[in-house]
Image (tube, rainbow, N blue to C red):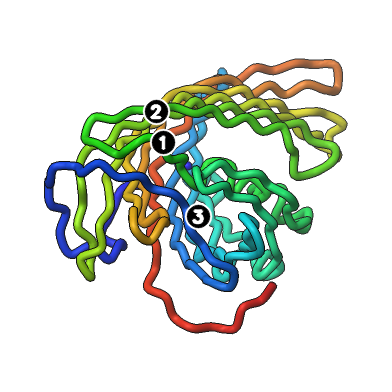
Amino acid sequence: MKAALGLVPIVSLVALPCSAQQARYRLPAGDTLRYREVTEGHIELRPPRGPVTITSHHDAIIAVVGGPGDTVTAWYEQLTISSVNSQGENHANTAAALHLPFRLLITPGGRVTLLSAPVFDKELAAVSDLTHEFEDFFISMTSGNLRAGSTWSDTIENSGAGQSQDTYHARHVRHYRIQRDTVLSGKASAVTIAVNQSVEVRDSSPLESQSATIATTIKGREEGTAVFATRQGRLVARERRGHLTGTQVFEGQGRRVEVPIVYDYTSRLSLQPFSPAEDRR
């Protein structure tokens, strides 16, 4: 939904006074960035018969390639999705998800519009809705100067469901505060930004084999930090941790069951050293 900055090529994080500067995203056509994203989740369902826990692991290498104007193309180069529950460990087959293109519009201020997402196979879509990968991937930047203590906010709302029979609505209200200047490897200048947000997600999906529907409503808080390279105009790292609570409702076959749910997660995003590779677009 991100905690070790050790994956980021940072030589030192030096607390320097923030100089007056502006930062905008810059990804010229043909340039390729590669990010590693690792997310660990812990879900606890609390039905009357006793708690049920599920842990999840998502590890991906994601390529982001600049296109004409503010457009970009992105895809998964590597992807591992696994979970553990009382029935044992499950590893999703993600081979068919690799190299399928997302089309995005990213403004210089960091506002992201999903132009199109791949259609993932039903087996994988039942495990994870990957169409929401870029919903809260990038942070936005202020149009003012970057100074220690500067603050700004934005709101993201998305109602696009990965499957036509599903419903989905997410709302992220994000608050930013400049913490300090940061020195990256190669003496590149950057800023460290505190990113805190409230999150609310509502979704539903049919359970065709049981002629029923399962709906989830969950909300809570997330806190973390991001590192943005000001001269290069790119997000370098982001780490976060969240705590969401809500209910999962099973409805069908003449009955309705409400189950409390708690979701805790940590996630980290890091820009990887560039290595030439054949672009698949």
Q: Where does residue 6 sit, x and y in percent of width and height?
A: 25, 60
Q: Which residue is mark 2?
A: 152
In the rendered structure, the answer to whether residue 31 lies left or right of residue 271 reads right
Circles 1 and 2, Cβ within 8 Å, touching? The answer is yes
Q: Nearer the viewer, residue 204 or 162?
A: 162
| Image-quadrant location for residue 249 | top right
Using the numbered discs, state the Cα–Cα distance from disc 2 to disc 3 in whole angstroms: 30 Å
Q: Quadrant of the C terminus?
A: bottom right
> Which callout, 1 or 2, points at the residue further toward the start of the chain?
1
In the rendered structure, the answer to whether residue 267 lies left or right of residue 105 reads left
User: Which label was assigned to residue 142?
Assistant: 1
**Crowd around label 3: few <14 · some 14–19 · many ≥20 (10 Å):** some
Q: Which residue is mark 3?
A: 58
In the rendered structure, the answer to whether residue 99 lies left or right of residue 40 reads right
Whether residue 37 appears in this view of the structure is yes
Whether residue 127 appears in this view of the structure is no
Using the numbered discs, state the Cα–Cα distance from disc 1 to disc 3 in whole angstroms: 30 Å
| Vertical relation: 207 (above or below) 233 | above
> Which callout, 1 or 3, points at the residue further toward the start of the chain?
3
Q: Where does residue 179 sit, x and y in percent of width and height?
A: 22, 37
